[in-house]
Image (cartoon, rainbow, N blue to C red):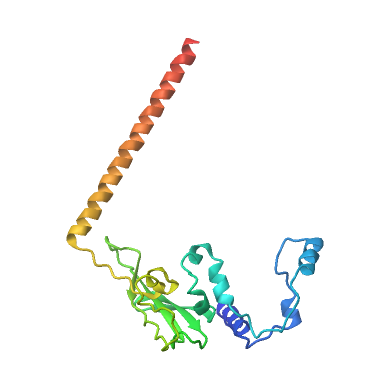
Amino acid sequence: MFNAINLKRKAVVIGDHEPADEECDAPLIHNLDEDELQKLENNAPVEGTPSKGVPGFCFYALNNASQISDMIHEYDAPILKFLVDISLQVHTDPTGFSLLFHFAENPYFTNAILTKYYELKIAPDNDDPLVSMAQPCRQEEAKEGCWGWTFHDEDRAKRSFFNFFDAVVKELTENLEAEIEHGMRVDFENGSNEDFDDFDEDEDDEDSDGALMERR
């Protein structure tokens, strides 16, 4: 059911399907009375030339998601406006899933789809029991002369949404792992002691207050 809805949404976004009037008979904003809806309609911008589909739909959806918008920078926006769909593929052997970002033809790179692959670890793993990102996606094949910068630019590449497609490589030395483990243990012990100290202080305060009440 959801797949059919997602496919229909993609068709609307890219302009392959123009919704009929009866399909649009639903409020864009719920819980508004008739006066408020009429006010919004009166203040709506004057209609211009109708566009095909919904340009920039995926970009605006991502940019309005608080957990994602911080990843998007000014120089990412023109590229992401060519993003027309985001789909999901579920894998069973090995267990995992892929996020597929579908792009329309654009002047920035030749890849039609950028993929991020996740592999789920079912067996217990003391080091990383949850999720591992195991498969690097194919880097963007930039078209010659189209970039004002490249993904290999050391400054901007560090702050690009497209770094999401970089493979996550965990290369910790034994010494660094030991340092991290030691630091976590110290933080835990310090936090525990502070918690108990605060608890003891609160108990002392309560005992003092109780003694004062009895004397009165």
In percent of width and height, residue 81 lies at: 54, 78
Instruction: Give the quarter of the image for residue 21.
Output: bottom right
Q: Residue at x 38, y 32 (%)?
A: 199
In percent of width and height, residue 192 lies at: 32, 40
In percent of width and height, residue 41 lies at: 78, 69
Instruction: Give the quarter of the image for residue 119.
Output: bottom left
**Quadrant of image for the N terminus:** bottom right
Relative horizontal placement of residue 55, taking residue 135 as reference (left or right): right
The residue sitting at the left extreme is 175
Relative horizontal placement of residue 96, taking residue 88 as reference (left or right): left
**Residue 86 visible in the shown view:** no
**Residue 188 visible in the shown view:** yes
Along the line of sight, which residue is nearer the eye, 68 or 142? 142
Relative horizontal placement of residue 46, taking residue 55 as reference (left or right): right
The residue sitting at the top extreme is 215
Q: Residue at x 80, y 66 (%)?
A: 38
Q: Residue at x 44, y 15 (%)?
A: 211
Up the image or down, 51 lies above or below 32; here it is below
Along the line of sight, which residue is nearer the eye, 97 or 102? 102
Along the line of sight, which residue is nearer the eye, 39 or 26? 39
